Amino acid sequence: MLSCRSTPSRPRKTRCPTARALNRLTEGTTVTSPWIAALIAVFAWWFFTGAILLVVRRADGGDAVAHGRNVFLSIPLAALGVAGLVVSSTEMTILNVYIAFLSTLLIWGWIELAFLAGVITGPERRPCPAGLTGKPRFIRAWHTVSHHELLLLFALLIILNVTRGAENTVAFWSYLILFAARISAKLNLFFGVPRINTEFVPQPLQHLKSYFRQGPITMAFPIGVTFLSITAACFAERMFSAPSPEALAGFALLTALATLATLEHWLMVVPLPDAKLWRWMLPETTQVTKDQTHEL
């Protein structure tokens, strides 16, 4: 079992002839390198983010049902992610490590698309009233995203149930990293951070910008960054002591993902032009100002 506290067991022999052939192609190749695994994680993070932003941006310029239609038509991708999750959890092989990781991104990506499309958000869709502070502001902010948060939690419990006691738990740890990082990021946007990128906030979620607070960091930031940094260090330590190529690739993917989550937090403080990673591939909408981005 792959975890931050235990080493994975050796993979059992694959029974399916097709799977055995694929495993022979992957074992002993460059995909077992931790550097290649890390690069794949970075590319997958960039690609999935860009693909979701592109779909949402195009829907912003479409008809009234464009966002909902995109979410509905992408359900097969979420189903593919669930199928990959179930299949890959049974055996710890190089192929299954990557299937588990990418399946998690498919599931997470569909939930993210449903959120950005305004389909699964929360019952409150109005801007935050001026002057609202303290507990009333927090409760109102929760109601803007409560359905989304509950869906994320539900998916986490499903993945936990599927991977509990399984040979391959890469999917669970990948999702848990994304889940924890997302909760921390939302809390930091609510409590306050110096840099907030609103350039990619889609039309259905424009009201959320009124719940963001731009200002000095609060205790939520060092707590979130410390937790994610320790997580990345923990998986890195397991990577360097991995007893098998499968474990090495799995821990490399998790280390890279936790590092990216930590970096995303720092981008709420450090003024770097991260939006340029995806802006070039998106259709133009309105004039973007520097106040909407992390740029200097």
Image: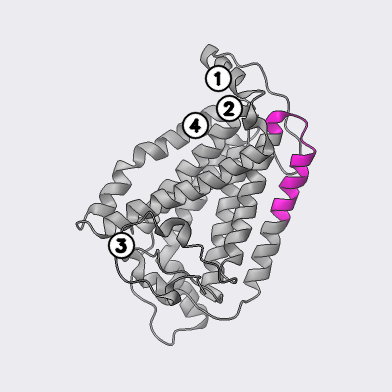
- Asked whether disc 1 touches disc 4, contact meaning CB atoms under 8 Å apart, the reply is no
- Residue 279: give x, y in percent of width and height: 41, 59
Residue 127 appears in the rendering = yes
In the rendered structure, find residue 95 and report the number of the disc placed on it.
2
Q: Position of 40 compared to 117: left or right?
A: right
The mark that comes first in sequence, 2 or 3, is: 2
Q: Residue at x 50, y 43 (%)?
A: 105
Q: Is residue 261 left or right of residue 52?
A: right
Q: Between marks 1 and 4, how big is the CA–CA gap? A: 15 Å
Task: Name the disc covering residue 154, or none.
Answer: none
The amino acid type of the residue labelled 1 equals: Leu
Q: Is residue 263 magenta?
A: no
Q: Are marks 2 and 1 in contact (CB under 8 Å)?
A: yes
- The residue carrying mark 3 is 284
Task: State if disc 2 and disc 4 touch (CB < 8 Å).
Answer: no
Camera-nearest residue between 103 and 262: 262
Q: Which stretch is magenta?
A: 230-247
Majority secondary structure of magenta residues: helix
Quarter containing the N terminus: top right
Q: Residues within 10 Å of mark 3 (few under 14, many from 20)?
A: few
Residue 261 versus residue 122: which sits nearer the camera?
Answer: 261
Mark 2 to mark 3: distance in Å?
Answer: 39 Å
Q: Nearer the viewer, mark 2 or mark 3?
A: 3
First reached walking from the N terminus: tag 2 or tag 1: 1
To which residue does mark 1 refer?
Answer: 22
Q: Residue 233's spot in the image, x, y percent?
A: 74, 52
Q: Give, as a three-letter code, the residue at label 2.
A: Leu
The residue type indicated by label 4 comes to: Gly
- Which SS class for mark 2? helix
Element under label 3? loop
Disc number for residue 84: 4
